[in-house]
Image (cartoon, rainbow, N blue to C red):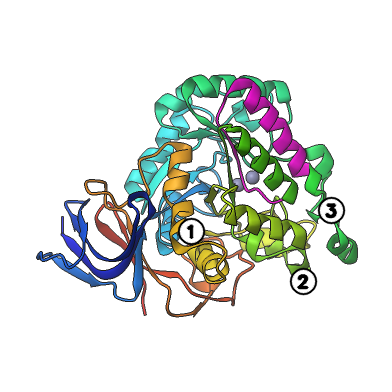
Amino acid sequence: MKSILIQSGHVVDPANQLDGEADVLVQEGKITKVGKGLKVKADQTINAKDKIVTPGLVDIHVHLREPGFEYKETIATGTLAAVAGGVTSVACMPNTNPPIDDQAIVYFIKSKAEKEGHCHVFPIGCISKRREGTEMAELGELKRAGAVGLSDDGAPIMNAELMRRVMEYAKMLDLVVIDHCEDSNLSNNGVMNEGVASTLLGLRGIPAASETVMVARNIVLAEMTGARFHVAHLSTAGSVELVRQVKKKGLKITAETAPHYWALSDKSIKNYNSNFKMNPPLRSDEDVAAIRKGIKEGVIDCIATDHAPHASTEKQCEFDEAAFGIVGLETLFPLTYSHLVEPGIISLSRAIEMLTVAPSKIVGIDKGTLSEGVVADVAIFDIQNEQKVDVSKFKSRGKNSPFNGWNLKGFAATTIVGGEIKYQRED
Ligand SMILES: [Zn+2]
Ligand SMILES: [Zn+2]
């Protein structure tokens, strides 16, 4: 395997408190040295001057769609989109067909990712059998096969008694429970956030309470059972406040949000463009302000994309009928850099922490650092030059992004996975 020397970049590795110019040496697929002015010979040298060099990003909320929905995305195309965004590890959600509710599917995804994938893939197992929300899946079996967390994402667990038992088992198994927090009765087939914007557009609303009440219920159950509970795609001011309060009590509760919840609001929905339709929906300006504050204050632990590719036919229809979800892997860091770091909401180091070590800890994987001896997963980002988002160039099969045409900084220049260059931007 070729050795690689990444020279003169601004290295940001929060796990090792590194934030300054340094070289990074990769040998035999591992990080072997990080330091200033390394005097070594390598098979390949990458000049990273004026760029930032970080641990490969870790996205713990990705829909790879395989098996079952290969027309939307595959493990091959989804992981290619990941490396094009500087992401080197993804945790994939189990709402596939068949769903990841037994060990055979976990093995299938792992072996497929091994053969055709471009980055590391960590499956998340179902909470309930067939994702029906009634009967508990074989949680121990899922854990033994290698699932890193439990979720029925795409759907909530409406049955509180089931959630209680799942949390009890998950605690014994030391697995995190990741809930898509939504009360589907309150959502009542809504298609966007309930508020002034939905009234103006004449679309059915999903109240913020639909998420917030479920976050509250899950917090009560996590407190009762002692389970590790993680809030997926947190989007409301009320949820931020609940998580803030429980953190003061020292409970093992964590939360993620996604770039669209700080970069857009329900006012962004124009001309009934279904690329602005996702679940949870884009919220009010007050919610957006609370999300930014929650990020700034450390209430929100990590950033994930909820990358949800769909075929164009599922999006090019009436807003009411269109599928929920947007792609996110290829705009993850540009939206974080341009909309959180540049405006001074958080430091570059904190942003990288929220995209590397913090999510790795939540799902218990040994990723997200440039520590000497670890598998060499490295991302190099260009934060100097603005570039236009162009969905036609996306590696993802899904082109459903509301950010098409936006000018952003922070696109990935080079991505290294396991010591091999898996992505190189064409200039
Ligand atoms: Zn979800
Ligand atoms: Zn999701």
Query: Which percent across, then down, holds residue 241?
Result: 70, 45
**Label 1 amino acid?**
Ala
Of label 1 and label 2, which has the lower sequence position?
Answer: 2
Q: Residue at x 38, y 45 (%)?
A: 113
Position of residue 218 relative to residue 47, above or below, is: above
Residue receiving disc 2? 270
Q: Is residue 371 visible?
A: yes
Q: Is residue 277 visible?
A: no
Secondary structure of residue under mark 2: loop
Secondary structure of residue under mark 3: strand
Specify few, some or many for label 3: CA neighbours under 10 Å numbering under 14, 14-19, or 20 or more: many
Q: From mark 1 to mark 3, how far is it between C-alphas?
A: 32 Å
Q: Residue at x 64, y 67 (%)?
A: 402
Of label 1 and label 3, which has the lower sequence position?
Answer: 3
Q: For residue 323, what is the image quadrant?
A: bottom right
Position of residue 136 relative to residue 23, above or below, is: above
On residue 205, which mark appears?
Answer: 3
**Label 3 amino acid?**
Gly
The residue stretch that appears in magenta: 210-236
Q: Nearer the viewer, mark 1 or mark 3?
A: 1
Position of residue 274 relative to residue 186, above or below, is: below
On residue 351, which mark appears?
Answer: 1
Quarter placement of the N terminus = bottom left
Q: Residue at x 42, y 64 (%)?
A: 84
Q: Nearer the viewer, residue 144 or 10?
A: 10
Specify few, some or many for label 1: CA neighbours under 10 Å numbering under 14, 14-19, or 20 or more: many
Q: From mark 1 to mark 2, how far is it between C-alphas?
A: 30 Å
Position of residue 312 relative to residue 356, above or below, is: below
**Label 2 amino acid?**
Lys
